[in-house]
């Protein structure tokens, strides 16, 4: 049983500020969040927890956000009525603070995460995308009964790149919908605005057609392949780096679609850093969008 402390939770100066909407009553979401068994589906493969003031949540296993630079324990600093927890998380040797608040909204529950201040050198860890994956998987567990897509931390060491690391990224996700739906999410400008949070995407659906989500020189560039409901391929530009290639295939399997993403043609291992977790985050939201109609995730502040 969780005992609430009377003193208020201190506000955290956020570096990262995200929220997720969940179509379930706040009492159910709160109890699910505190349940160590459910944590094994979105936070780690093995969980030990003491959900009391001055307690902790310890997570481990290949799908837990635990590497030498990110400690495998969240320490509870304070509870607050109604339904908020202040945690500490050691990142790069510094104890950072984050607050998780549960707010009742007309459609169910909104979970707000504010995390900061974080060492500036932690940008290379892509913590925002890790939070995105955690929130997407928690929402998927509660609303779909299973995680969206877990990230494999077994070989994740973005600050210790070696010549033996891969020069490509491969990720895939099963979506319980026909191929036309995830395909359309990627090539429909209106859907891109909500899925990838692109303000003014450009989609010229033909070979060598312009395909952009954000500013020129960051992200998609032009189509190389466009096979309706089956495959898209486009060049990917980022600042002054040599263009790389992103291939996404949509394969019907039983009553679902296997979406397979292959990002390749990198010149150096250092250039690949971050894309594995970023694409996992994108595919997590793709599953939520296709199966629930929206991801429900908002990035209010991202390392500003």
Image (cartoon, rainbow, N blue to C red):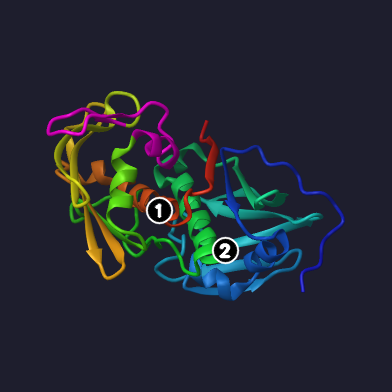
Return the x and y of residue 232 as percentages of the image width and height. Answer: 19, 45
What residue sits right under mark 1 in the picture? 290
Taking the image as shown, residue 150 lies to the left or right of residue 184, namely right
Magenta region: which residues? 189-212
Return the x and y of residue 293 as percentages of the image width and height. Answer: 47, 50
Count neighbours of disc 1 (C-alpha within 10 A) and say few if under 14, some if 14 to 19, many if 20 or more. many
Q: Residue at x 50, y 51 (%)?
A: 131
Could you say which disc has been placed on residue 73 in the image?
2
Task: List the single residue furthest toward the top.
Answer: 216
Q: Nearer the viewer, residue 241 or 188?
A: 188
Taking the image as shown, residue 17 lies to the left or right of residue 126, namely right
Q: Which of marks 1 and 2 is nearer the N terminus?
A: 2
Task: List the single residue furthest toward the right.
Answer: 6
Q: Say whether residue 211 is visible.
A: yes
Q: Residue at x 54, y 63 (%)?
A: 143
Return the x and y of residue 216 as percentages of the image width and height. Answer: 29, 23
Q: Which quarter of the figure has residue 4? A: bottom right
Q: Distance between the residues labelled 1 and 2?
A: 33 Å
Q: Which quarter of the figure has residue 236? A: top left
Q: What element carries label 2?
A: strand
On screen, 182 above or below 11? Answer: below
Q: Which residue is drawn at 87% across and 56% down?
A: 6
Taking the image as shown, residue 191 lies to the left or right of residue 24, namely left
In magenta segment, residue 145 = no
Q: Nearer the viewer, residue 128 or 194?
A: 194
In magenta segment, residue 203 = yes
Depth check, mark 1 against mark 2: the one in front is: 1
Quadrant placement of the N terminus? bottom right
Q: How many marks?
A: 2
On screen, 38 above or below 197? Answer: below
């Amino acid at each position: 049983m969780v005992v609430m402390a009377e003193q208020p939770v201190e506000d955290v100066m956020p570096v990262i500020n995200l929220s997720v909407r969940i179509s379930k009553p706040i009492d159910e979401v709160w109890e699910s969040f505190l349940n160590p068994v459910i944590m094994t589906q979105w936070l780690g493969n093995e969980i030990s927890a003491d959900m009391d003031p001055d307690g902790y949540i310890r997570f481990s296993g290949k799908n837990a956000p635990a590497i030498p630079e990110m400690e495998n324990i969240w320490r509870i600093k304070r509870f607050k009525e109604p339904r908020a927890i202040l945690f500490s998380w050691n990142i790069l040797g510094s104890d950072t603070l984050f607050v998780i608040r549960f707010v009742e909204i007309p459609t169910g529950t909104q979970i707000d995460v504010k995390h900061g201040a974080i060492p500036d050198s932690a940008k290379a860890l892509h913590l925002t995308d890790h939070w995105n994956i955690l929130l997407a998987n928690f929402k998927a567990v509660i609303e779909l009964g299973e995680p969206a897509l877990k990230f494999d931390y077994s070989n994740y060491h973005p600050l210790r790149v070696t010549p033996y690391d891969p020069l490509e990224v491969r990720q895939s996700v099963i979506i319980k919908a026909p191929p036309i739906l995830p395909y359309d999410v990627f090539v429909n400008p209106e859907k891109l605005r909500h899925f990838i949070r692109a303000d003014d995407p450009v989609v010229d659906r033909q070979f060598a057609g312009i395909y952009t989500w954000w500013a020129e020189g960051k992200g998609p560039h032009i189509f190389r392949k466009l096979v309706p409901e089956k495959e898209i391929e486009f060049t990917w530009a980022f600042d002054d780096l040599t263009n790389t290639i992103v291939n996404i295939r949509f394969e019907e399997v039983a009553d679902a679609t296997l979406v397979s993403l292959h990002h390749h043609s990198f010149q150096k291992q250092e250039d690949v850093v971050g894309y594995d977790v970023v694409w996992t985050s994108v595919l997590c939201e793709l599953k939520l969008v296709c199966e629930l109609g929206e991801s429900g995730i908002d990035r209010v502040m991202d390392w500003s």
